[in-house]
Image (spheres, rainbow, N blue to C red):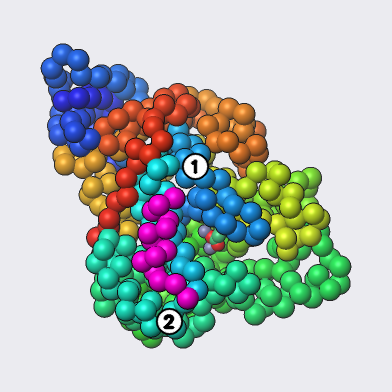
Amino acid sequence: MDLIIKNGKVVTASKTYRADVGIRGGKVVAIGKNLRSKKGAQVIDARGKYVIPGAIDPHVHCDLPFCGTVSANFFEETASAATGGITTVIDFAIQTKGKSLKEAIRSRKKIADPQVAIDYSLHVGITDWKNKRTQKELPEVIKGGIPSFKMFMIYRGQGWMSDDADLYEALGLARRYGGRIGVHAENVYVTETLTAKYLKEKKFATYNHALTRPNFTEGEAIQRAITLAEAADGSLYIVHMSTKEGLEAVRAGKKKGIDVYAETCPQYLFLTDDLFKKKNGHWYATCPPIRKRADCRALWEGLEEGTIPNMGTDTCTFNTKQKSLYRGVFARIPFGMPGLETFLPMMYTAVMKRGWRVNDLVAVTSTNSAKIFGLYPKKGTIAIGSDADIVVFDPKKRVTISPKRLQSTCDWNPYTGQKLVGYPMVTISRGKVIAKNGKFIGERGRGRFVPRKAYGHI
Ligand code: URP
Ligand code: ZN
Ligand code: ZN
Protein backbone atom coordinates (compact mmCIF):
# COMPACT_ATOMS: atom_id res chain seq x y z
CA MET A 1 0.00 0.00 0.00
CA ASP A 2 1.15 3.52 -0.76
CA LEU A 3 -0.94 5.21 1.89
CA ILE A 4 -2.76 4.09 5.03
CA ILE A 5 -5.27 6.16 6.93
CA LYS A 6 -5.08 4.78 10.44
CA ASN A 7 -7.32 4.84 13.51
CA GLY A 8 -10.16 6.89 12.02
CA LYS A 9 -13.91 6.41 12.06
CA VAL A 10 -14.96 5.42 8.54
CA VAL A 11 -18.35 6.86 7.60
CA THR A 12 -20.29 5.95 4.46
CA ALA A 13 -23.92 6.74 3.70
CA SER A 14 -24.96 3.56 5.46
CA LYS A 15 -22.26 2.57 7.97
CA THR A 16 -19.94 3.95 10.64
CA TYR A 17 -17.05 1.86 11.95
CA ARG A 18 -13.48 2.08 13.17
CA ALA A 19 -10.98 0.85 10.62
CA ASP A 20 -7.79 1.63 8.78
CA VAL A 21 -8.08 2.31 5.07
CA GLY A 22 -5.32 1.10 2.76
CA ILE A 23 -4.71 2.70 -0.62
CA ARG A 24 -2.68 1.56 -3.60
CA GLY A 25 -2.57 2.87 -7.15
CA GLY A 26 -5.23 5.45 -6.39
CA LYS A 27 -7.79 2.88 -5.19
CA VAL A 28 -8.96 1.60 -1.84
CA VAL A 29 -7.44 -1.87 -1.55
CA ALA A 30 -7.92 -2.76 2.11
CA ILE A 31 -10.21 -1.79 4.97
CA GLY A 32 -9.60 -3.38 8.36
CA LYS A 33 -8.00 -3.28 11.75
CA ASN A 34 -4.27 -2.74 12.20
CA LEU A 35 -3.38 -2.64 8.52
CA ARG A 36 0.33 -2.86 7.93
CA SER A 37 2.35 -1.84 4.98
CA LYS A 38 5.81 -1.88 3.56
CA LYS A 39 8.35 0.68 4.67
CA GLY A 40 8.01 4.06 3.02
CA ALA A 41 4.22 4.06 2.80
CA GLN A 42 2.63 7.28 3.89
CA VAL A 43 0.58 7.02 7.07
CA ILE A 44 -2.08 9.49 8.14
CA ASP A 45 -3.16 9.29 11.75
CA ALA A 46 -6.92 9.92 11.76
CA ARG A 47 -7.55 9.28 15.46
CA GLY A 48 -10.55 11.34 16.56
CA LYS A 49 -11.41 12.14 12.94
CA TYR A 50 -14.01 10.98 10.45
CA VAL A 51 -12.83 9.28 7.27
CA ILE A 52 -15.50 10.09 4.71
CA PRO A 53 -15.92 9.91 0.92
CA GLY A 54 -14.87 13.14 -0.77
CA ALA A 55 -17.80 15.39 -1.48
CA ILE A 56 -19.20 15.54 -5.03
CA ASP A 57 -20.48 18.81 -6.40
CA PRO A 58 -22.70 18.08 -9.41
CA HIS A 59 -23.26 21.74 -10.27
CA VAL A 60 -20.35 24.10 -10.92
CA HIS A 61 -19.50 26.69 -13.55
CA CYS A 62 -15.78 27.33 -13.98
CA ASP A 63 -14.37 29.53 -16.74
CA LEU A 64 -17.93 30.40 -17.78
CA PRO A 65 -18.39 33.43 -20.03
CA PHE A 66 -21.57 34.87 -18.51
CA CYS A 67 -23.20 38.26 -17.96
CA GLY A 68 -20.38 40.09 -19.73
CA THR A 69 -17.50 38.52 -17.82
CA VAL A 70 -15.95 35.11 -17.11
CA SER A 71 -16.28 33.15 -13.85
CA ALA A 72 -13.21 31.97 -11.89
CA ASN A 73 -11.15 29.36 -13.68
CA PHE A 74 -10.99 25.58 -13.37
CA PHE A 75 -7.72 25.57 -11.48
CA GLU A 76 -8.65 28.18 -8.89
CA GLU A 77 -12.02 26.57 -8.34
CA THR A 78 -10.96 22.92 -8.15
CA ALA A 79 -8.04 23.77 -5.84
CA SER A 80 -10.47 25.62 -3.60
CA ALA A 81 -12.95 22.71 -3.85
CA ALA A 82 -10.26 20.21 -2.83
CA THR A 83 -9.31 22.31 0.18
CA GLY A 84 -12.94 22.20 1.31
CA GLY A 85 -13.21 18.42 0.91
CA ILE A 86 -14.66 18.10 -2.60
CA THR A 87 -13.02 15.49 -4.83
CA THR A 88 -15.29 15.50 -7.90
CA VAL A 89 -17.13 18.31 -9.67
CA ILE A 90 -19.51 18.24 -12.61
CA ASP A 91 -19.31 21.34 -14.80
CA PHE A 92 -21.35 22.17 -17.92
CA ALA A 93 -20.40 21.98 -21.60
CA ILE A 94 -22.92 24.40 -23.03
CA GLN A 95 -23.71 24.07 -26.71
CA THR A 96 -23.28 27.12 -28.92
CA LYS A 97 -26.38 27.56 -31.10
CA GLY A 98 -25.75 26.15 -34.56
CA LYS A 99 -22.90 23.99 -33.32
CA SER A 100 -22.81 20.44 -32.06
CA LEU A 101 -22.99 18.90 -28.59
CA LYS A 102 -19.76 17.03 -29.20
CA GLU A 103 -17.99 20.22 -30.10
CA ALA A 104 -19.16 21.76 -26.80
CA ILE A 105 -17.72 18.78 -24.93
CA ARG A 106 -14.43 18.93 -26.84
CA SER A 107 -13.90 22.60 -26.23
CA ARG A 108 -14.86 22.36 -22.56
CA LYS A 109 -12.40 19.50 -22.02
CA LYS A 110 -9.70 21.49 -23.73
CA ILE A 111 -10.15 24.27 -21.17
CA ALA A 112 -10.63 21.98 -18.16
CA ASP A 113 -8.06 19.22 -18.68
CA PRO A 114 -4.84 21.22 -18.21
CA GLN A 115 -6.26 22.96 -15.16
CA VAL A 116 -8.37 20.62 -13.03
CA ALA A 117 -6.91 19.67 -9.66
CA ILE A 118 -9.56 17.02 -8.97
CA ASP A 119 -11.57 14.63 -11.12
CA TYR A 120 -14.44 16.09 -13.04
CA SER A 121 -17.24 15.32 -15.40
CA LEU A 122 -19.56 17.37 -17.57
CA HIS A 123 -23.26 17.77 -18.13
CA VAL A 124 -24.12 18.96 -21.62
CA GLY A 125 -26.13 22.17 -21.86
CA ILE A 126 -28.56 21.79 -24.77
CA THR A 127 -29.39 25.15 -26.35
CA ASP A 128 -30.33 24.13 -29.89
CA TRP A 129 -32.72 21.20 -29.71
CA LYS A 130 -34.36 21.92 -33.08
CA ASN A 131 -31.02 21.38 -34.76
CA LYS A 132 -31.33 17.78 -36.02
CA ARG A 133 -27.66 17.17 -35.30
CA THR A 134 -28.36 17.74 -31.60
CA GLN A 135 -31.01 15.03 -31.60
CA LYS A 136 -28.76 12.62 -33.47
CA GLU A 137 -25.88 13.23 -31.11
CA LEU A 138 -27.77 12.89 -27.85
CA PRO A 139 -27.68 9.05 -27.70
CA GLU A 140 -24.01 9.07 -28.73
CA VAL A 141 -23.17 11.55 -25.98
CA ILE A 142 -24.90 9.33 -23.40
CA LYS A 143 -23.03 6.27 -24.66
CA GLY A 144 -19.81 8.29 -24.53
CA GLY A 145 -20.14 8.80 -20.75
CA ILE A 146 -22.26 11.91 -20.37
CA PRO A 147 -25.79 10.82 -19.48
CA SER A 148 -27.01 14.14 -18.03
CA PHE A 149 -28.06 17.37 -19.70
CA LYS A 150 -29.18 20.83 -18.68
CA MET A 151 -31.82 22.81 -20.51
CA PHE A 152 -32.64 26.37 -19.61
CA MET A 153 -36.21 27.60 -19.37
CA ILE A 154 -34.74 31.16 -19.16
CA TYR A 155 -31.67 33.04 -20.48
CA ARG A 156 -33.25 33.88 -23.85
CA GLY A 157 -30.81 36.79 -24.27
CA GLN A 158 -27.85 34.50 -23.62
CA GLY A 159 -29.08 32.25 -26.48
CA TRP A 160 -29.47 29.30 -24.14
CA MET A 161 -33.24 29.04 -23.76
CA SER A 162 -35.24 25.95 -24.74
CA ASP A 163 -39.00 26.00 -25.22
CA ASP A 164 -41.46 23.51 -23.75
CA ALA A 165 -41.59 21.43 -26.91
CA ASP A 166 -37.80 21.09 -26.90
CA LEU A 167 -37.91 19.99 -23.30
CA TYR A 168 -40.70 17.50 -23.92
CA GLU A 169 -38.90 15.90 -26.86
CA ALA A 170 -35.51 15.84 -25.14
CA LEU A 171 -37.01 14.20 -22.03
CA GLY A 172 -38.49 11.46 -24.20
CA LEU A 173 -35.38 10.82 -26.26
CA ALA A 174 -32.90 10.93 -23.35
CA ARG A 175 -35.01 8.46 -21.40
CA ARG A 176 -34.71 5.85 -24.17
CA TYR A 177 -30.93 5.76 -23.64
CA GLY A 178 -30.85 6.08 -19.85
CA GLY A 179 -30.19 9.83 -19.88
CA ARG A 180 -31.67 12.53 -17.69
CA ILE A 181 -32.62 16.12 -18.45
CA GLY A 182 -31.78 18.75 -15.86
CA VAL A 183 -33.68 22.02 -16.03
CA HIS A 184 -33.05 25.54 -14.88
CA ALA A 185 -36.68 26.23 -14.03
CA GLU A 186 -37.83 29.85 -14.01
CA ASN A 187 -40.76 31.29 -15.96
CA VAL A 188 -39.12 33.36 -18.70
CA TYR A 189 -42.21 35.32 -19.73
CA VAL A 190 -42.94 36.64 -16.26
CA THR A 191 -39.32 37.30 -15.26
CA GLU A 192 -38.59 39.13 -18.51
CA THR A 193 -41.80 41.17 -18.35
CA LEU A 194 -41.23 42.16 -14.72
CA THR A 195 -37.60 43.03 -15.40
CA ALA A 196 -38.53 45.26 -18.36
CA LYS A 197 -41.27 46.95 -16.30
CA TYR A 198 -38.98 47.64 -13.33
CA LEU A 199 -36.25 49.02 -15.56
CA LYS A 200 -38.76 51.26 -17.34
CA GLU A 201 -39.88 52.56 -13.95
CA LYS A 202 -36.21 53.20 -13.08
CA LYS A 203 -36.32 50.73 -10.20
CA PHE A 204 -32.68 49.75 -10.44
CA ALA A 205 -31.76 48.73 -6.88
CA THR A 206 -30.49 45.21 -6.16
CA TYR A 207 -33.57 44.11 -4.22
CA ASN A 208 -35.52 44.26 -7.49
CA HIS A 209 -33.62 41.13 -8.53
CA ALA A 210 -35.83 39.28 -6.03
CA LEU A 211 -39.01 41.20 -6.89
CA THR A 212 -38.71 40.42 -10.60
CA ARG A 213 -38.28 36.69 -9.93
CA PRO A 214 -40.99 35.92 -7.35
CA ASN A 215 -41.36 32.40 -5.95
CA PHE A 216 -44.18 31.43 -8.26
CA THR A 217 -41.93 31.93 -11.32
CA GLU A 218 -39.83 29.01 -10.13
CA GLY A 219 -42.76 26.98 -8.75
CA GLU A 220 -44.68 27.25 -12.01
CA ALA A 221 -41.68 26.33 -14.15
CA ILE A 222 -40.84 23.33 -11.98
CA GLN A 223 -44.46 22.17 -12.16
CA ARG A 224 -44.42 22.62 -15.95
CA ALA A 225 -41.20 20.62 -16.31
CA ILE A 226 -42.66 17.84 -14.15
CA THR A 227 -45.81 17.76 -16.29
CA LEU A 228 -43.65 17.47 -19.41
CA ALA A 229 -41.56 14.71 -17.81
CA GLU A 230 -44.70 12.79 -16.92
CA ALA A 231 -46.09 13.16 -20.45
CA ALA A 232 -42.79 12.14 -22.05
CA ASP A 233 -42.09 9.41 -19.49
CA GLY A 234 -38.75 11.16 -19.02
CA SER A 235 -36.25 11.41 -16.21
CA LEU A 236 -36.02 14.94 -14.85
CA TYR A 237 -33.57 16.69 -12.54
CA ILE A 238 -34.37 20.12 -11.14
CA VAL A 239 -31.15 22.06 -10.62
CA HIS A 240 -30.68 24.70 -7.90
CA MET A 241 -34.20 24.50 -6.46
CA SER A 242 -34.82 27.52 -4.24
CA THR A 243 -38.50 27.72 -3.25
CA LYS A 244 -41.07 25.98 -1.10
CA GLU A 245 -43.42 26.06 -4.12
CA GLY A 246 -40.86 24.13 -6.17
CA LEU A 247 -40.42 21.64 -3.37
CA GLU A 248 -44.18 21.08 -3.14
CA ALA A 249 -44.34 20.39 -6.88
CA VAL A 250 -41.46 17.89 -6.66
CA ARG A 251 -42.98 16.21 -3.62
CA ALA A 252 -46.33 15.82 -5.40
CA GLY A 253 -44.65 14.62 -8.60
CA LYS A 254 -42.68 11.96 -6.75
CA LYS A 255 -45.83 10.84 -4.98
CA LYS A 256 -47.42 10.29 -8.39
CA GLY A 257 -44.45 8.14 -9.38
CA ILE A 258 -42.86 10.63 -11.79
CA ASP A 259 -39.12 10.20 -12.21
CA VAL A 260 -38.00 13.55 -10.82
CA TYR A 261 -34.96 14.47 -8.75
CA ALA A 262 -34.19 17.88 -7.29
CA GLU A 263 -31.05 19.39 -5.83
CA THR A 264 -30.78 22.46 -3.68
CA CYS A 265 -27.72 24.56 -2.84
CA PRO A 266 -26.24 25.99 0.37
CA GLN A 267 -27.24 29.55 -0.53
CA TYR A 268 -30.92 28.54 -0.46
CA LEU A 269 -30.53 26.98 2.98
CA PHE A 270 -28.39 29.65 4.63
CA LEU A 271 -29.02 33.03 2.96
CA THR A 272 -32.12 35.22 2.61
CA ASP A 273 -33.08 38.05 0.28
CA ASP A 274 -32.80 40.78 2.93
CA LEU A 275 -29.09 40.70 2.03
CA PHE A 276 -30.00 42.46 -1.23
CA LYS A 277 -30.94 45.57 0.78
CA LYS A 278 -27.60 45.66 2.59
CA LYS A 279 -24.30 47.18 1.50
CA ASN A 280 -22.88 45.14 -1.40
CA GLY A 281 -26.16 43.28 -1.73
CA HIS A 282 -25.41 42.78 -5.43
CA TRP A 283 -22.64 40.33 -4.55
CA TYR A 284 -25.35 37.84 -3.50
CA ALA A 285 -27.32 37.91 -6.75
CA THR A 286 -27.65 34.54 -8.41
CA CYS A 287 -30.40 32.90 -10.46
CA PRO A 288 -32.77 31.86 -9.03
CA PRO A 289 -32.37 34.41 -6.23
CA ILE A 290 -31.93 33.66 -2.55
CA ARG A 291 -35.36 33.68 -0.91
CA LYS A 292 -37.14 34.03 2.45
CA ARG A 293 -36.59 32.22 5.73
CA ALA A 294 -39.76 30.13 5.06
CA ASP A 295 -38.16 28.78 1.87
CA CYS A 296 -34.95 27.86 3.72
CA ARG A 297 -37.04 26.01 6.31
CA ALA A 298 -39.02 24.16 3.64
CA LEU A 299 -35.86 23.11 1.78
CA TRP A 300 -34.33 21.76 4.99
CA GLU A 301 -37.50 19.71 5.43
CA GLY A 302 -37.18 18.54 1.82
CA LEU A 303 -33.66 17.33 2.51
CA GLU A 304 -34.63 15.66 5.75
CA GLU A 305 -37.60 13.78 4.27
CA GLY A 306 -35.58 12.74 1.16
CA THR A 307 -37.54 14.73 -1.44
CA ILE A 308 -34.22 16.48 -2.07
CA PRO A 309 -31.64 13.69 -2.03
CA ASN A 310 -28.51 15.63 -2.91
CA MET A 311 -26.92 19.05 -3.18
CA GLY A 312 -24.81 21.09 -5.57
CA THR A 313 -23.32 24.51 -5.03
CA ASP A 314 -24.03 26.18 -8.40
CA THR A 315 -20.67 27.84 -7.87
CA CYS A 316 -20.12 30.57 -10.45
CA THR A 317 -17.56 32.83 -8.83
CA PHE A 318 -17.32 36.50 -9.63
CA ASN A 319 -15.07 38.74 -7.57
CA THR A 320 -16.09 42.19 -6.34
CA LYS A 321 -14.59 43.90 -9.38
CA GLN A 322 -16.65 41.70 -11.69
CA LYS A 323 -19.76 42.18 -9.57
CA SER A 324 -19.30 45.95 -9.82
CA LEU A 325 -19.97 45.70 -13.56
CA TYR A 326 -23.63 46.07 -12.57
CA ARG A 327 -23.07 49.80 -12.07
CA GLY A 328 -26.16 50.16 -9.90
CA VAL A 329 -28.62 48.23 -12.10
CA PHE A 330 -29.91 44.89 -10.79
CA ALA A 331 -30.40 43.39 -14.26
CA ARG A 332 -26.70 43.82 -15.08
CA ILE A 333 -25.27 41.92 -12.11
CA PRO A 334 -23.05 38.96 -13.06
CA PHE A 335 -25.19 36.20 -11.51
CA GLY A 336 -23.39 33.67 -9.35
CA MET A 337 -21.38 33.17 -6.17
CA PRO A 338 -18.46 31.23 -4.75
CA GLY A 339 -19.49 28.12 -2.81
CA LEU A 340 -17.16 25.16 -3.30
CA GLU A 341 -14.73 25.45 -0.40
CA THR A 342 -17.35 26.10 2.25
CA PHE A 343 -19.91 23.51 1.06
CA LEU A 344 -18.93 20.52 3.18
CA PRO A 345 -17.90 22.32 6.39
CA MET A 346 -20.92 24.67 6.31
CA MET A 347 -23.21 21.68 5.87
CA TYR A 348 -21.43 19.69 8.60
CA THR A 349 -21.80 22.47 11.16
CA ALA A 350 -25.47 22.99 10.26
CA VAL A 351 -26.51 19.34 10.22
CA MET A 352 -24.81 18.60 13.53
CA LYS A 353 -26.99 21.32 15.08
CA ARG A 354 -30.02 19.71 13.45
CA GLY A 355 -29.17 16.28 14.87
CA TRP A 356 -28.27 14.47 11.64
CA ARG A 357 -26.05 11.42 11.58
CA VAL A 358 -22.77 11.96 9.70
CA ASN A 359 -23.99 9.17 7.36
CA ASP A 360 -26.82 11.42 6.19
CA LEU A 361 -24.38 14.23 5.48
CA VAL A 362 -22.30 11.81 3.39
CA ALA A 363 -25.43 10.74 1.50
CA VAL A 364 -26.48 14.29 0.65
CA THR A 365 -23.03 15.67 -0.19
CA SER A 366 -21.53 12.65 -1.95
CA THR A 367 -23.18 9.24 -2.29
CA ASN A 368 -26.54 10.29 -3.69
CA SER A 369 -24.97 12.52 -6.34
CA ALA A 370 -22.65 9.64 -7.28
CA LYS A 371 -25.65 7.34 -7.70
CA ILE A 372 -27.87 9.81 -9.56
CA PHE A 373 -25.09 10.77 -11.98
CA GLY A 374 -23.65 7.31 -12.66
CA LEU A 375 -20.39 7.67 -10.72
CA TYR A 376 -21.14 5.09 -8.04
CA PRO A 377 -19.33 3.05 -6.64
CA LYS A 378 -16.19 4.43 -8.30
CA LYS A 379 -16.91 7.66 -6.45
CA GLY A 380 -19.20 8.49 -3.52
CA THR A 381 -18.22 5.77 -1.07
CA ILE A 382 -15.29 4.12 0.69
CA ALA A 383 -15.16 0.49 -0.44
CA ILE A 384 -12.63 -1.93 -1.85
CA GLY A 385 -12.06 -1.01 -5.50
CA SER A 386 -13.43 2.52 -5.19
CA ASP A 387 -11.29 5.49 -6.11
CA ALA A 388 -9.43 6.68 -3.03
CA ASP A 389 -11.21 10.04 -2.94
CA ILE A 390 -11.30 10.52 0.79
CA VAL A 391 -11.53 13.32 3.33
CA VAL A 392 -10.14 13.07 6.82
CA PHE A 393 -12.53 15.37 8.62
CA ASP A 394 -11.80 16.92 12.00
CA PRO A 395 -15.13 17.31 13.82
CA LYS A 396 -13.61 19.58 16.44
CA LYS A 397 -11.72 22.08 14.32
CA ARG A 398 -13.08 25.59 14.69
CA VAL A 399 -12.86 27.94 11.73
CA THR A 400 -14.33 31.38 11.14
CA ILE A 401 -14.92 31.91 7.44
CA SER A 402 -12.98 34.76 5.92
CA PRO A 403 -11.99 35.17 2.26
CA LYS A 404 -8.36 35.81 3.28
CA ARG A 405 -8.09 32.45 5.01
CA LEU A 406 -9.68 30.43 2.22
CA GLN A 407 -7.80 28.87 -0.67
CA SER A 408 -10.29 30.49 -3.05
CA THR A 409 -8.88 33.45 -4.92
CA CYS A 410 -12.17 35.31 -4.67
CA ASP A 411 -11.97 38.46 -2.57
CA TRP A 412 -15.35 37.96 -0.89
CA ASN A 413 -17.35 35.08 0.47
CA PRO A 414 -21.08 34.87 1.12
CA TYR A 415 -20.49 33.19 4.49
CA THR A 416 -17.83 35.53 5.88
CA GLY A 417 -17.91 35.59 9.67
CA GLN A 418 -19.73 32.24 10.01
CA LYS A 419 -18.26 30.20 12.84
CA LEU A 420 -17.81 26.56 11.91
CA VAL A 421 -17.13 23.56 14.11
CA GLY A 422 -15.71 20.78 11.94
CA TYR A 423 -13.40 21.17 8.94
CA PRO A 424 -11.51 18.95 6.47
CA MET A 425 -8.02 18.14 7.71
CA VAL A 426 -6.78 16.20 4.68
CA THR A 427 -8.23 15.69 1.19
CA ILE A 428 -7.08 12.72 -0.86
CA SER A 429 -7.77 12.46 -4.57
CA ARG A 430 -7.15 9.07 -6.19
CA GLY A 431 -4.71 8.20 -3.43
CA LYS A 432 -2.77 11.44 -3.32
CA VAL A 433 -2.96 14.04 -0.58
CA ILE A 434 -3.91 17.24 -2.35
CA ALA A 435 -5.01 19.49 0.50
CA LYS A 436 -4.01 19.72 4.13
CA ASN A 437 -5.16 22.00 6.95
CA GLY A 438 -6.84 24.54 4.69
CA LYS A 439 -4.11 24.66 2.03
CA PHE A 440 -4.06 23.14 -1.44
CA ILE A 441 -0.89 21.11 -2.03
CA GLY A 442 -1.90 19.25 -5.18
CA GLU A 443 -1.11 19.77 -8.83
CA ARG A 444 -2.73 21.70 -11.58
CA GLY A 445 -4.04 19.31 -14.28
CA ARG A 446 -3.86 16.10 -12.20
CA GLY A 447 -7.64 15.72 -12.26
CA ARG A 448 -9.16 13.53 -14.95
CA PHE A 449 -12.37 13.52 -16.90
CA VAL A 450 -14.56 10.71 -15.57
CA PRO A 451 -17.00 9.03 -18.00
CA ARG A 452 -20.26 8.17 -16.27
CA LYS A 453 -22.81 5.38 -16.55
CA ALA A 454 -26.35 5.90 -17.83
CA TYR A 455 -29.48 4.87 -15.90
CA GLY A 456 -28.13 6.34 -12.62
CA HIS A 457 -30.67 6.19 -9.80
CA ILE A 458 -30.69 6.15 -6.03
O1 URP B 1 -26.74 32.62 -11.35
C1 URP B 1 -26.30 31.55 -11.66
N1 URP B 1 -26.85 30.48 -11.12
N2 URP B 1 -25.27 31.45 -12.50
C2 URP B 1 -24.84 30.29 -13.15
C3 URP B 1 -25.73 29.88 -14.31
C4 URP B 1 -26.90 29.04 -13.86
O2 URP B 1 -28.02 29.35 -14.22
O3 URP B 1 -26.75 28.06 -13.15
ZN1 ZN C 1 -29.06 27.47 -13.84
ZN1 ZN D 1 -25.77 26.71 -12.47
- Answer with left or right where residue 194 lies relative to residue 297: right
Residue 165 visible, this angle: yes
Which residue is located at x 32 percent, y 50 percent? Answer: 449
Q: For the residues carrying marks 2 and 1, which lies nearer the camera in this image?
A: 2
Mark 1: which secondary structure?
helix
Which residue is located at x 38 percent, y 39 percent? Answer: 445
Rendered view: 228 above or below 11? below
Asked whether 304 or 231 is in front, the reply is: 231
Label the magenta part by its dominant secondary structure: helix
Q: What range of the chain is rendered magenta?
A: 98-111
Q: Is mark 1 within 8 Å of ligand 1?
A: no
Looking at marks 2 and 1 on the same chain, the residue that comes earlier in the sequence is marked by 1
Q: Which residue is mark 1?
A: 77
- Residue 453 quadrant: bottom left
Asked whether 244 or 429 is in front, the reply is: 429
Magenta span has 389?
Answer: no
Ligand 1: image quarter? bottom right
- Label 2 neighbourhood size at 10 Å, few (<14), some (14-19), many (20+)? few
Residue 146 in the image: state x and y as whole percent: 32, 62
- Answer with left or right where residue 1 lies relative to residue 171: left
How far is disc 2 from disc 1 in space, using C-alphas?
33 Å
Q: Quadrant of the C terminus?
A: bottom left
Which residue is located at x 35 percent, y 22 percent? Answer: 48
Rendered view: 2 above or below 69? above
Q: Which mark is residue 10?
A: none
Residue 312 visible, this angle: no
Which residue is located at x 60 percent, y 59 percent? Answer: 66
Q: Which mark is residue 131?
A: 2
